[in-house]
Amino acid sequence: MRPLLEVDRLSKSYGDLPVLRDVAFHVDEGESLAILGPSGCGKSTLLRILLGLEGYDAGEVRGPVDRAGYLPQDALLFPWKTVVQNAELPLQIRGVDRKRRREEVASRLPSFGLAGFEDAYPHELSGGMRQRAGLLRAVVSGAAVLVLDEPFGALDTLTRHRLQDWLSGLMSELHRTMLFVTHDLEEAVVLADRVLVLSGRPAGVIGERGISLSREERSDRLSPLFYREKDGLLSMIRKGDER
Ligand code: ADP
Ligand code: MG
């Protein structure tokens, strides 16, 4: 299978600060790849480069950057637009007529838990709802790959768990390719088919682990199977720290 996205020996500095060093990986079509790394190591920078929003110093990026649906760390909804108006924006930009874009958004509102909130403004929504609205916008765009930056990082633990389980279910229905960054081991285990572990800044790939749990096993954060995956990732991080 040909990878959808390939990154080769990517390096980037901000002035004297090296942020990414020789980062290399690929994302296969249909898979969910987590990039796990400590805060400040360069995860958001990496995603912005992949999306073509930021330049880089060396290396190569091959993939559908122009067909990515991006959910930034904070959903970045337009505050003067309603949920529907925000969600339909990618279709509006492509010139899809109003009736068709409204139908497309309306058909997805229930599975995003936003039915009844179509005319609400972002400030009227909870943090979790804003992230779901942002993700709805990314999904509606028909993107070849969904790119998520710590999607639930700003939420409280219970809400975060609930939304992680929800997204895990949604992805198994949507069959989309997903690439997300996180500093949260559990988020990686719940949502990823494969996890890349990054070192501290400058970020480089220090390990990789496939997660082969069923959906039920992924949602049981206290089970021995879940714990084993988490522990595997943790020991990879520790080994990286010793280097
Ligand atoms: P992460 O998302 O992993 O927390 P970031 O990619 O946001 O990390 O940042 C990595 C490092 O690069 C940090 O030290 C941050 O301060 C720095 N940085 C990020 N963006 C810029 C920028 N536009 N100019 C200068 N430094 C930046
Ligand atoms: Mg970040």
Image: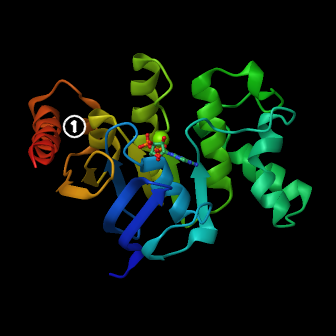
The residue lying at 14 percent from left, 28 percent from top is 223
The answer to whether 30 is drawn above or below residue 218 in the figure is: below
Position of residue 163 relative to residue 30, above or below, is: above
Q: Nearer the viewer, residue 172 or 234?
A: 234
Instruction: Tell me the amino acid under the disc marked 1.
Output: Glu
Quarter placement of the N terminus: bottom left
Instruction: Name the residue rendered at 15%, 38% in the picture.
Output: 234
Corner quadrant of residue 76? top right
In the rendered image, residue 119, in percent from the top left (x then y), is placed at 84, 30
The percent position of residue 33, horizontal first and vertical second, equals 35, 56
**Can residue 13 be seen from the camera position used here?**
yes
Residue 175 visible? no
Residue visible at 83% across and 34% down in the picture = 82
Total numbered badges shown on the rendered structure: 1
Q: Using residue 121 as the reference point, say whether residue 149 is left or right of it.
A: left
Tell me if mark 1 has few (under 14), some (14-19) or many (20+) residues whose alpha carbon lies within 10 angstroms of its own.
some
The extreme right residue here reads 98
What residue would you read off at disc 1? 217
Query: Where does the image place residue 53, in percent across and percent down from the top left?
Result: 62, 61
- Residue placed furthest toward the front: 16
> x, y (%) of residue 125?
70, 22
* Residue under the image location 73 percent in, 38 percent down: 77
**Nearer-the-camera pick, 99 or 240:** 240
- State the SS at label 1: helix
